Amino acid sequence: MSKERNVDTAFFGQPRGLSTLFFTEMWERFSYYGMRAILLFYMYYAATKGGLGMNQTTAASIMSIYGSLVYLSGVVGGWLSDRVWGSRRTVFIGGVLIMFGHIALSLPFGVSALYVSIALIVVGTGLLKPNVSEMVGGLYSPEDQRRDSGFSMFVFGINLGAAVAPWAVPWAANGFGLNLFHGEMNFHAGFSLAAIGMFFGLVQYVIGGRKYLSKDSLYPEDPIEKDELRPVIIWSIVGVVAVVIILALLAAMGQLNITNIITLITIIAIALPIWYFVMMLNSKKVTKTEKSRVVAYIPLFIAAVIFWAIEESGSVVLALFAAQRTVLHIGSWHFAAANFQTLNPLFIMILTPVFVSLWDHWKNQPSAPGKFAAGLVFAGLSYAFMALPALIHGTTAGRVSPFWLVGSWFIVEIAEMLISPIGLAVTTRLAPNAFKSQMMSMWFLADAAGQAVNAQIVKYYSSSTEVPYFLTIGLVSIVFGIILMFFVKKIHGLMGGVD
């Protein structure tokens, strides 16, 4: 009985520490999605409109590779938490870097400030994001039945911040509804609001962390020993030297430019997961059954790459479509192109309870590969749907209804419900014992690879090419989904009893 009385239920039946992590992630997502909602426009709008005047194609590629780098950096962030700083300190350092990244964008220092901001936010997000989630798990004992509902509340916080930001930040950039900037965009005011959001998140994280988070989170789970430190330093130096040599060679050939740097990052984002798969399949630490499961994971990983390439295009291709091809009012209600970014988290919040109930009550539901196959078909349909306005009205007919974008986002979020949570669960279950953490990194690397691919193919998008662009990518996803359906039983068999 005393045990029951000592259970912490202060935050809607959950541990009080969950509120600290809930609001930390909510404000971090507010700052990130708020910044992301207007960044593309800031890059390619002319200087007379408050932008940097970049080439639109270059700006779109930068947006995609930015997202890829964020997920690539999470691999390093998890390692630093486990081996060096501990999760609580790692999250704090990450939050500070993110805040300074937004501050850099809020200052009128042009392209230099943009690249400094990207570097700070990429590193900061890599430190913060994976480790906040890890700390949520640490609030519960293995037998605590509240774990799933606690994570559901945490995910709601993520999407709440992400849903509010695309309204609040563009509102600030547009003069807070007061026409302070005489009808022009002041992007720096919007980025300032993102910085303030991250500041609020840090303040409550520090105060709440001292009171409600375990002191164990101050220390690394597997502190690195002195004899292990030397090879880490050596390989880090080798990596840095290799990058410097490549950049020096590009400079010597007169090819050191943003386009080639994006291509280099794309190659790394695709090569890294391939290296991981080869390493695991050739490791003596991995049993025969575990190797079979890794093989089963490969087609699921490829499916995830295709899905994320489409899903993450919301802040790039669909953002361009919103700005250039969409009627930005419904009756007398006018809105900004950036506001469409709220549809992603909004539909996730609406659809999540529907799919949770579906999986709880569907007795003969498809296996994980079957859900992935269906998810790819839906993802492809969301892009095929976006080809319809131009097919019906033509690409020179001007702007089209905003409900085309609403419909596309709704369809792709059905795909996300079939792939994202299922992928997280199956990744943990298919992971070899010796590579549990690395396998979790693989799931995030699928997103990184998808966005890296986007950085290359987005160059072919324009208002005049939208029909072949949307149809080609949509059909690739649909065809791969159909092919995957034919191999569902084979993949399920390779999963070695995991369902």
Image (cartoon, rainbow, N blue to C red):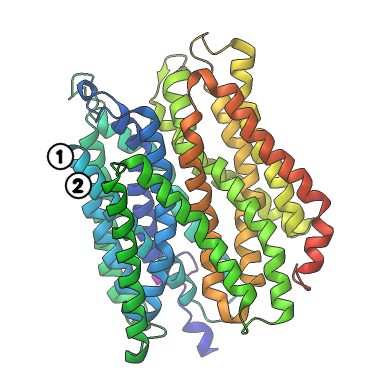
Q: Position of residue 38 (x, y in %)?
A: 34, 35
Provide the major secondary structure of the magenta segment.
loop
- The quarter in which the N terminus is drawn is bottom right
Magenta includes 432?
no
The answer, for residue 239, to whether it is visible in the render is yes
**SS label for mark 2:** helix
Q: Position of residue 210 (x, y in %)?
A: 28, 75
On the picture, is 138 further left or further right than 416? Answer: left
Name above or below for residue 150 compared with residue 366. below
Three-letter code, disc 2: Ala
Q: Earlier in the sequence, mark 2 or mark 1?
A: 2
- The quarter in which the C terminus is drawn is bottom right
Three-letter code, disc 1: Phe
On the picture, is 99 further left or further right than 91? Answer: left
> Which residue position holds label 1?
109
User: Which is closer to the viewer, label 2 or label 1?
Assistant: 1
Query: Which residue is located at x 33 percent, y 28 percent?
Result: 55
Separation of residues labelled 2 and 1 (CA atoms): 8 Å
Name above or below for residue 175 compared with residue 378. above
- Viewer-closest of 322 and 281: 281
Q: Position of residue 352 (x, y in %)?
A: 61, 50
The answer, for residue 363, to whether it is visible in the render is no
Contact? badges 2 and 1 (CB < 8 Å): yes
> Which residue position holds label 2?
104
Q: Quadrant of residue 342?
A: top left
Query: Which residue is located at x 57 percent, y 35 percent?
Result: 409
Q: Around disc 2, counting alpha carbons within 10 Å, would you say few (fewer than 14), some (14 to 19), or many (20 or more)?
A: many
**SS label for mark 1:** loop
